[in-house]
Amino acid sequence: MSGGDAHPIYAPMLLPDAATATALRNQTGIARAFEHFDKVTVACVSIGSWEPGISTVHDMLSDEERSHYASLGVAAEMSAHLFDAEGRRVGRDLGERCITVKTHQLRRVPEVVAIAGGQRKGPAIDAVLRSGLVTSLVTDTSAADYLMTAGPAPKSALNRTDPDGV
């Protein structure tokens, strides 16, 4: 519809180990698609709560893995990246197994539009907004009402920088 070219990535989002994910990222078609990440000017992402049926990543993991990431305080996921309630990335090892855009690439995108709604997703939306990765939010009134009572994100989360460069 926009007239742009599509650059699909034909791969599962989550792989069993980092070596398999690395091998897939190096395949010609996938590597070419990844080259476009640094040229993106508007990214649309979804936000998932860390619970069954609402988080794609949660549902793909084993019970053991879910327990491990829950112990790290996971409250939300976006683009296969996990965040705690304060918006800090947790479970970075999972990112090595995923075929997804890296957070440092998302930080360079001028407009990152998150799409999520529903009162159940309110805490997850709040967590991702606190990460500083999102510039705009498309949501519904129930999630917006939750966010209005949650209060503003700390100013440090709003500057879109990441101290450890990821």
Image (cartoon, rainbow, N blue to C red):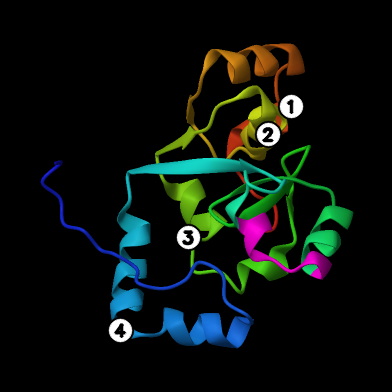
Give SS at disc 2.
Answer: helix
Residue in the picture at 10% in, 46% down: 3
| Separation (CA) of disc 3 from disc 2 | 19 Å
Q: Amino acid at mark 3?
A: Val
| Separation (CA) of disc 2 from disc 4 | 35 Å
Q: Are marks 4 and 1 in contact (CB under 8 Å)?
A: no
Q: Which residue is mark 3?
A: 101
Q: Which residue is mark 1?
A: 154
Towards the viewer: 103 or 62:
62
Quadrant in which the N terminus appears: top left
| Separation (CA) of disc 3 from disc 1 | 25 Å
Residue extent of the magenta highlight: 57-64
Label whose residue precedes the other's in the sequence (2 or 4) = 4
Drawn side of residue 81 relative to residue 32, left or right: right
Q: Which residue is mark 4?
A: 28
Q: Which residue is mark 2?
A: 130
Q: Amino acid at mark 4?
A: Thr
Quadrant in which the C terminus appears: bottom right
Q: Residues within 10 Å of mark 2 (few under 14, many from 20)?
A: many
The percent position of residue 78, horizontal first and vertical second, equals 57, 48
Q: Residues within 10 Å of mark 4 (few under 14, many from 20)?
A: few
Task: Name the quadrant containing residue 159.
Answer: top right
Label whose residue precedes the other's in the sequence (3 or 1) = 3
Give the foreground label among 3 and 1.
Answer: 3
Drawn side of residue 71 relative to residue 139, left or right: right
| Separation (CA) of disc 4 from disc 1 | 41 Å
Label whose residue precedes the other's in the sequence (4 or 3) = 4
Q: Are marks 3 and 1 in contact (CB under 8 Å)?
A: no
| Separation (CA) of disc 4 from disc 3 | 17 Å
- Residue 29 showing in the rendered view: yes
Q: Are marks 1 and 2 in contact (CB under 8 Å)?
A: yes
